[in-house]
Image (cartoon, helix red, strand yellow):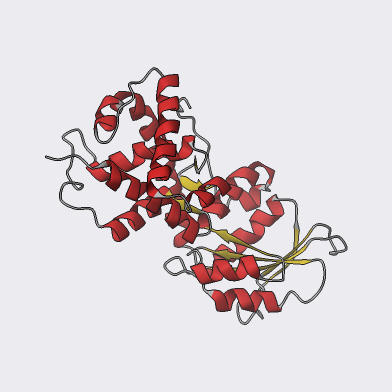
Amino acid sequence: MANMSKERVTEYLRAIILILHENGGSLSAKKVIEELEARLKPNTVEKYEYKGGGVRWIKVMQFSSIGLVKAGWLRKKKGVWYITEEGEMSLTLEPDVFRQTIDEKYRQWAQSRNLSVVEGEDLVEEAAADEFQSRNFEQAQNDALEEIKNHIRKLDPYEFQDLVAALFRGMGYYTPFIAPKGPDGGIDVVAYKDPIGAESPRIRIQVKHRPDSKIGRPDVQALSGSLHRDGYIGIIVSSGGFTPDAISEIRTSGKHMEKMDLDSFIELWEQHYEKMTDEDKQLLPLRAISFLAPQE
């Protein structure tokens, strides 16, 4: 059976960068794979399943993405993939230059680990043992992240709103206002650096808990309209993510606004977890475990 061509692998790698670009710069590895499958429609050859487990195109893509990381275009952290500024710029490169850059970075990485420099599908077989630990590590991160996400998705909107307020308290903010059930005027949580809001920044937070749908430009515009005084920052927290139009509106708005999707929320929750009160921790209790990490 024929292997995947270098041109086809390059198509997958460029699509990874484009998908991350269109989703505001980050996305879970699981979602990236889903998007790749929907866009590039793997053929029969690419869907071949190895006897040892795993689908050809996914294994080739995951290993080939090492080149994206080594080129400084992609970062992987706890099951989430992030595009860098250099990665954004790589979208302007011609396919041949794009591939040559990745190949060179991969060669440097392989030589530093005393691996044979191989290409295409042979790359997967040659480096399978060396990469096994890395893939297991990433899979463990993905599984843990998905378990946390599934728990959050099952919360009702007010439970998720309380979770967001708890996060900001863990980050050192006071939350004098958390919207009660009913109309909230577009603001769900207000966060201050001091008890009375004398210091900047003063944050107005809009919480959207629609796990199966992304929020669009109108939601962003609604928050922007509430930021009519100096010293106020708007943050939109969306468990379902953001449409490209929403991301563009946030970036180009004359008001200071930031976005937080579910991946970002979980990362911040983990980062500030130990600073939270016991009561707030119980809203989303976590336990750290140790896992043998791959060598970089």
Of the 4 image quadrants, the one containing the N terminus is top left
Residue 160 location, quadrant = bottom right
Residue 123 horizontal/vertical position (percent): 29, 30
Front one among 123 and 165:
123
100 shown above or below 240? above
Which residue does the image show at 19% across and 48% down from the upper left? 47
248 shown above or below 284? below
Q: Residue furthest right?
A: 198
Q: Residue furthest left?
A: 1
Which residue does the image show at 71% across and 66% down from the upper left? 256
Residue 16 horizontal/vertical position (percent): 40, 51
Q: Is residue 285 left or right of residue 107?
A: right
190 shown above or below 273? below
Residue 167 horizontal/vertical position (percent): 64, 54
Which residue does the image show at 16% across and 46% down from the upper left? 45
Q: Is residue 1 left or right of residue 87?
A: left
Front one among 85 and 207:
85
Q: Can residue 49 be seen here?
A: yes
197 shown above or below 217? above
Residue 255 location, quadrant = bottom right
**Total number of numbered labels?**
0
Q: Is residue 196 left or right of residue 48?
A: right
Residue 106 horizontal/vertical position (percent): 41, 31
Front one among 224 and 89:
89
Front one among 187 and 213:
213
Q: Can residue 146 be seen here?
A: no
Which residue does the image show at 84% across and 58% down from the upper left? 194
